[in-house]
Amino acid sequence: MARKRPVSIQQLAQTHLGYDDLRPGQEAAIASVLQHCDTLAVMPTGSGKSAIYQLAAANIPGSTIVVSPLLALQKNQVDSIAQDDIDVGYAAVVNSTITGCERAKIFDRWRNGEIEFLFLAPEQFNNADMIEHLQAAPPSLFVIDEAHCISEWGHSFRPDYLRLGTVIEALGHPTTLALTATASPPVREEIMQRLGMKNPRIIVKGFDRPNLRLAVENYDDEDEKREIFLKRIQQLTKPGIVYVATRKITESLAAALNEVGVQAIAYHAGLKTKEREQAQNAFMSDEAEVIVATTAFGMGVDKPNVRFVLHYHISDSIDSYYQEIGRAGRDGDSANIILFYTPDDLNLRKFFSGGGKLDAEKVIELAKIVRQQSEPIHPKALKPLTDLSQSKLKCILNQLELVNVVKTLPTGEVFANDNPPDLEQAAQEVLHAQERKTKVERSRLEMMRGYAEVQDCRRKYLLNYFGDPREELCGYCDNCNSGIATQQNDRRKPYKLNSRILHKSWGEGTVMRYEGDKIVILFDEVGYKTISLEAALLRGLLQRVE
């Protein structure tokens, strides 16, 4: 591959993408990558995150690997690069849909330097020959698109996300770029830690979406909520998205909407691939006015004219909620964002967040099985030796690696550490790590409850959560429109934002924001806590950490 001549970032944008101007954050992120700095860029949906790696790669010698979570998203990204008006190089994708012959041809082209962008899902690195093929021509840039999936999916059904740091090291630690639309401070920390980023630069831009009209409607029971929901959606300008918590409710709610004359279709992960494609195509073509979906829908979907996003159930976190509502109003026109809230919905989310607990005996048993192997063994070969599911097995292996019980080769095979710690102690460390994560997840749900019940400006609440402190009222959320929200510039702030403090019971944490007479702190061990400022001062609960 010919060496690329350095040019200005603005010139890159004009030459390769036809951009006259870059959006906020793009130039800083591109500049960081061109300086070979590991970079985490957190920018809103529709802000041109893909342009960052495309333009950076256009001025870096060598090839680029892009880790992308969904087949449809990979296809969209490859197709966008292939457009006539984009000139950033040849792109290819390796996934489960291509033949062995096609795969071999792609790797031949990779070794010959003919591929600029190679798109992969994290599971592809489990193939024994994948790392070997990539090492034959190591990439210069390693990109993780939708990087929040590391935190959201890595601990459950896609544990291979947690191994990406090992893959990056096996490839010689090329410059690493993580991209996401929403990541709160703890999610950012986990992304950087899991990827093994070295002295990363963090670029956070543009969380504010003033065209999204935020509102929450409170209901005492499910029947009342359902009745008013069906009436309300008939009055709203279409098209729109409705998010619900379970697959069953997508079906029942879509059917109920059709009965009242709203053309609706259900979408969830339990549908066959063809059925999901048909549902998405019906919505994208406006054949269906409304799509009722679980969180399985939305990633990589770019429909500019979505006029509303409604949540029939509360989301599991502000991170998820902001990601989902960001799919509305991408054309810049006003869009309605409404959460239909009943306190009982919190119990459903708590049930989901409490699932998948590990057992110390299972952790120790798996560690012993790995020790008994005379040579490295692949997780797929381990599964018949246990009664664990493949995803649970991988999750435990990931945790055992973190406590130095096992090590993982670039091929995905695992072997026992030569100097392992005591297994009982290691198992307790694994369980403690899971318990800590559960507490943090529950605390994130509490922050979502806080959004639903806050008596202040809702936009201010969201922006403060993501580390973009605001004092001014937005003037167009439901609380601002009703006069409930009030300006609070004169309140006491004895602790600086982002400063470190120590609580007698919860340990060290970071001051995130103030809410009236309360202070919100993100504790390292227990997650988010909202504390009465007066009580904290009177009882001496908080100490500054120098």
Image (cartoon, rainbow, N blue to C red):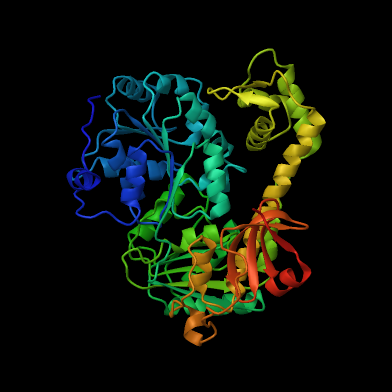
Provide residue 113's location: percent of width, then percent of height. Answer: 29, 23
Residue 67 appears in the picture as rendered? no
Q: Is residue 106 left or right of residue 402?
A: left
- Residue placed at 44% from the left, 32% from the top? 96
- Total numbered circles: 0
Query: Which one is in front, 467 or 45?
Result: 467
- Residue placed at 48% from the left, 63% from the top? 468
Residue 354 appears in the picture as rendered? yes
> From this viewpoint, which residue is outermost toward the front?
546
Provide residue 490's location: percent of width, then percent of height. Answer: 55, 80
Q: Is residue 39 left or right of residue 368?
A: left
Query: Which one is in front, 39 or 319?
Result: 39
> From this viewpoint, which residue is outermost toward the bottom?
483
Provide residue 322's location: percent of width, then percent of height. Answer: 49, 61
Where residue 111 sits, quadrant-wise, is: top left
Q: Is residue 204 above or below residue 494?
A: above
Q: Is residue 32 above or below residue 314?
A: above
Provide residue 510's location: percent of width, then percent of height. Answer: 62, 57
- Residue placed at 56% from the left, 48% from the top? 152
Where residue 343 sits, quadrant-wise, is: bottom right
Query: Which one is in front, 483 or 103?
Result: 483
Q: Is residue 382 left or right of residue 30?
A: right
Q: Quadrant of the N terminus?
A: top left
- Residue placed at 56% from the left, 68% from the top? 312
Q: Is residue 136 left or right of residue 432?
A: left
Q: Is residue 516 above or below residue 444?
A: below
